[in-house]
Amino acid sequence: MKFKNRNLRAIAEKVIGDAEFFPYRSSSYITQFFEECDLDFVHDGSTRWAWTAERLSELLQEPQPTAHALPDRFVHVLRVLMHKSDAEQNDPDRSLALGELNKPLSREGYEAFYGDDDLLYIRHIGTKTISAGANPHRPFTPKEIERREQLVEYLDKCSEDELIEQVLLPLFRQLGYHRITAAGHKDKALEYGKDIWMRYALPTQHFLYFGVQVKKGKLDAAGINRGSNSNIAEMHNQILMMLGHEIFDPETNRRVLVDHALIVAGGEITKQARNWLGEKLDASKRSQILFMDREDILNLHIVSSLPLPDGAISKLAPAFDGDAPF
């Protein structure tokens, strides 16, 4: 990945403090800054902005973790740069500094924002893909835990269609999937076992296609269904249909087979259910099956900084003194 020289210089000037709202750093403090970023860059006494721009360019040339995402170490430098403890007196919440940083970033198709944890995140403007930091296994902040509990309540009461429309579709878009299409009840009979189909662009610009089968409640291997729980045996034929029928991609104007079947449950997917399905499918089809249960949905939704569904937002208002959730 490569930024234009103009934009690299603008970011470098913020690192060295030659820009408004950023603390000034002399040669030794530039070295100290990169040490805080866990980098072994030592300023050699040359022109400060030029040397810093070269180091930033080196970081940008490192591998991208996913398509449309900036390299991890480059994002970490921006996160250290924008830490709120370095706020200037005339910009206590760093909103003005954030606006200045977003000028060069937006020219490259990215935008920076603060999450609920007060850390900086970088998002690709076109695809909404978040660079680094979206680790679903990291510890949650108190605000994130509160939002997670509200989402749990919503999943307990929502319908299957609401789970798809209000939770899964925004989540998949945020995670970088394209052409996300929900079947809906009207034409679901024509969708061959898929509630959703979507595609994902690899860094090589090849596409992987996914068919998604969604169940609202717990998915298990018990002989009797209870309440909103579903039996994995009900999904067996749907999975086979999903993997065996083509879908039409209007952007590429061709019919393609689904590469992976993603089974999503608003509740738990038990180990017995996973094992039962694995035993029923041959080795080639087994490798095409992916699972996503409630814990996965909750964790990915929170770390992706998505707004809560409409049905959960009203309950959050008192906790945030009337402010809209992040």
Image: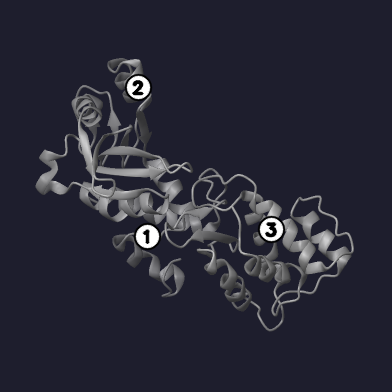
The secondary element bearing badge 2 is classed as helix
Residue 318 lies in quadrant: bottom left
Residue 209 can be seen in this image? yes
Horizontal and vertical percent position of residue 128:
44, 58
Horizontal and vertical percent position of residue 81:
69, 64
What residue is pinned by disc 1? 308
What residue is pinned by disc 3? 77
Asked whether, in this view, residue 13 is left or right of residue 243, the answer is: right
| Dot 1 and dot 3 residues touching (CB under 8 Å) | no
Q: Residues within 10 Å of mark 2 (few under 14, many from 20)?
A: some
Asked whether, in this view, residue 285 is left or right of residue 101, the answer is: left
Could you tell me how far apart the alpha carbons at marks 1 and 3 are, in whole angstroms?
Answer: 30 Å
Asked whether, in this view, residue 196 is left or right of residue 148, the answer is: left
What residue is pinned by disc 2? 286
Seen in the picture, residue 100 relative to 90 is either above or below; the reply is above
Q: Residues within 10 Å of mark 3 (few under 14, many from 20)?
A: some
Q: Mark 1 or mark 2, which is nearer to you?
A: 2
The secondary element bearing badge 1 is classed as loop
Indicate the amino acid at tag 3. Answer: Val
Horizontal and vertical percent position of residue 216:
25, 42
Q: How many marks?
A: 3
What residue appears at the point 76 percent right and 62 percent down from the top-left corner?
A: 52
Seen in the picture, residue 31 relative to 40 is either above or below; the reply is below
Of pointers 1 and 2, the one earlier in the residue sequence: 2
What residue appears at the point 70 percent right and 52 percent down from the top-left corner?
A: 58
Of pointers 2 and 3, the one earlier in the residue sequence: 3
Indicate the amino acid at tag 1. Answer: Leu
